[in-house]
Image (cartoon, helix red, strand yellow):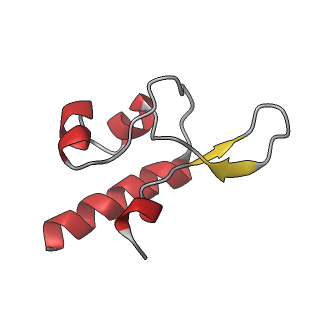
Amino acid sequence: MPLEQRLRPIVFSPIYNKPREGRGFSLKELEEAGLSPNLAKRLKIPIDRRRKSLHKENVEKIKEILASFKID
C-alpha cells in the first residue's frame, strides 16, 4: 500500500454520519499518539487543524506509521 494512502485518517461526515477519508489527522489524535505537530510535518503526516475530534482508529494508524518508521 502506498504511503500516501496509509496517511489518510478516517472521519465521519457531519451531515450523513458516514465514514470517509479525511484531509489530515487532528491535533488531539497526534497528541494521543505521542507525536508533536512539528515532527508530524517532518514525517509528512498530514495535519488538519480544523478537526477537533479524536478517533481511536486514527491514533492506532499513527502509532503503526511511527512503528514502521522506527523499523526502517
On the picture, is 49 further left or further right than 19? left
* 10, 23: nearer the viewer: 23
Q: Quadrant of residue 69?
A: bottom left
The N terminus: image quadrant:
bottom left
Q: Is residue 24 above or below residue 71?
A: above
Which residue is at a point 17% across and 43% down the rendered structure image? Answer: 42
Q: Quadrant of residue 22?
A: top right
Q: Is residue 57 above or below residue 23?
A: below
On the picture, is 14 further left or further right than 44? right
Q: How many marks?
A: 0
The C terminus: image quadrant:
bottom left
Which residue is at a point 27% across and 48% down the rendered structure image? Answer: 44
- Residue at the right extreme? 16
On the picture, is 10 further left or further right than 61? right
Q: Is residue 25 above or below residue 65?
A: above
Residue 62 rendering spot, x and y as whole percentages:
37, 53
Q: Is residue 54 above or below residue 45?
A: above
Which residue is at a point 46% across and 41% down the rendered structure image? Answer: 24
Residue 30 rendering spot, x and y as whole percentages:
36, 39
Which residue is at a point 39% across and 36% down the rendered structure image? Answer: 47
Residue 4 rendering spot, x and y as whole percentages:
40, 60
